[in-house]
Amino acid sequence: MQKRVIGWFCWIPRVSAILFTFLISLFSLDVFSSKKGVFSLLLSLLVHLLPVFFLVLVIVVAWKHELLGSLFFFVLGLFYFSVAFQRGFHAGALFIPVAMLCIGLLFFLGFLVKSRDKLGEKVCGAKKKTAKKKY
């Protein structure tokens, strides 16, 4: 049972971060509704996908270093929250920063569980470096 709980704390933040990134990438599909040329359309799509590329980079870092990943997601959530409310309050704008803060919290909880229990090393795949014995 304990191995199963540690596995949940290991994989839930990763899966939720990937699903969140996929959701953010869906927002970039609105470029196809405009009547632009192919080059302009591809350039617009690239610009709309820049946050997704950055989130993929954050997920890659967070995959191995959960504490750093939780810090990134907390900072991104707080930054988005401050920028969104400087431009005016919109209730729909709460979803993105709240989701980022929750993912950051999940990564932090995963870090705590994994660092507290040696079983977390086996379940999550992270191995602590140990000194090799010389004979």
Image (cartoon, rainbow, N blue to C red):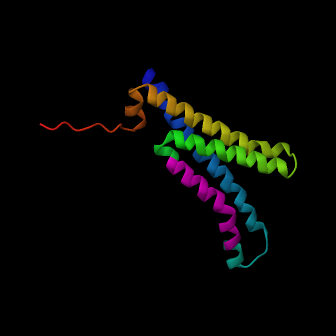
Horizontal and vertical percent for residue 71?
59, 42
Q: Is residue 15 visible?
A: no
* Residue closest to the far top: 1
Residue 132 drawn at (x, y percent): 22, 38
- Residue 6 lies left or right of residue 121; in this view the side is right
Residue at 71%, 70% (x, y): give it.
44
Q: Main secondary structure of the magenta part?
A: helix
| Residue pictured at 51% horizontal, 29% vertical | 112
> Along the horizontal axis of the image, is 95 left or right of 123?
right
**Count of marks placed on residues:** 0
The vertical placement of 50 against 90, above or below, is: below
Q: Quadrant of residue 123 in the image?
A: top left
Residue 59 at what x, y percent from top left?
A: 54, 48
Query: Is 130 situated left or right of 126 in this image?
Result: left
Quick check: is 124 in the magenta stretch?
Answer: no
Q: Is residue 91 visible?
A: yes
The quarter of the rendered structure image containing the C terminus is top left
Q: Which residues are magenta?
A: 43-61
Please say if 8 is above or below 60.
above
Q: Residue at x 63, y 51 (%)?
A: 22
Q: Identify the residue at horizontal 74%, vertical 66% (top origin).
A: 31
Up the image or down, 8 lies above or below 97; here it is above
Please identify the residue farthest to the right as the structure is shown: 88
The N terminus: image quadrant = top left
Quadrant in which residue 39 is drawn: bottom right
List x then y, in percent, for residue 66: 51, 40
- Residue 44 falls inside the magenta stretch: yes
